[in-house]
Amino acid sequence: MNRTDSEKKNVKITVKTTITNDGDSETFELKTSGVLHSKASADYLQYEEHDENGKIQTLVKFNDTDVMLKRSGSVKMKQNFHEAETTNGYYESMYGRLLMETNTQKIVREWDSVQREGLIRLLYRLNMQGNSLGTYLMEITYREEA
């Protein structure tokens, strides 16, 4: 996208995550509204999620080579994605902090300036506290509202 302005745009967001572990797959989908804006050399998606313990503010910062996912609220989490690299992060809830290791296999980023919609696709393996949680395919689609 890389717009030169920092104007905030309202967007519809769908986050679809498929987790594959030991041959079994499970898919989760979140549909919500949020805000998209650009600042410096990165774009930002911001949206709110809810779980049984309350609100979670989610920030996705992305550019051509990296993606950072940060959550705050009832869950605190920071996860970095850089293709063909393993990065460290954390997941913190009322039960304590767990260390995460993310091995990013593929990052795809697309922006259709005619349709005013974008896609971030992340394929990665996730370990938490040294235990494999499987292979994740996360697709974040977002479309500017009229």
Image (cartoon, rainbow, N blue to C red):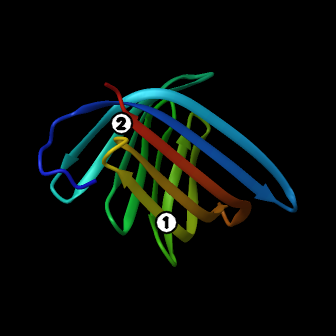
Q: Residue at 49% of width from left, 27% of height from top? A: 32
Q: Which mark is residue 138?
A: none
Q: Going by the image, does 15 lie left or right of 56?
A: right
Q: Residue at 48% of width from left, 69% of height from top? A: 87
Which of 145/63 is in front?
145
Q: Residue at 48% of width from left, 46% of height from top? A: 77
Mark 1, residue position: 107
Q: Which residue, as the protein is rendered here, is positioned at the far bottom?
A: 84
Where does the C terminus fall, quadrant-wise?
top left
Q: Quick one: label 1, few (<14), some, or many (20+) residues within 10 Å?
A: some
The vertical placement of 34 against 68, above or below, is above
Q: Which x, y percent locates residue 89?
A: 49, 59
Q: Which x, y percent locates residue 101?
A: 57, 65
Q: Say which amino acid is labelled 2.
A: Gln
Q: Which x, y percent locates residue 65?
A: 36, 69
The quadrant in which residue 109 appears is bottom left
Q: Quick one: label 2, few (<14), some, or many (20+) residues within 10 Å?
A: some
Q: Say which amino acid is labelled 1.
A: Ile
Mark 2, residue position: 46
Q: Secondary structure at mark 2?
A: strand
Q: Which residue, as the protein is rendered here, is positioned at the far left?
A: 5
Q: Which x, y percent locates residue 29?
A: 64, 36
Which of 67/12 is in front?
12
The Cα atoms of the two marked residues, 1 and 2, are separated by 19 Å
Q: Going by the image, does 14 lie left or right of 2?
A: right
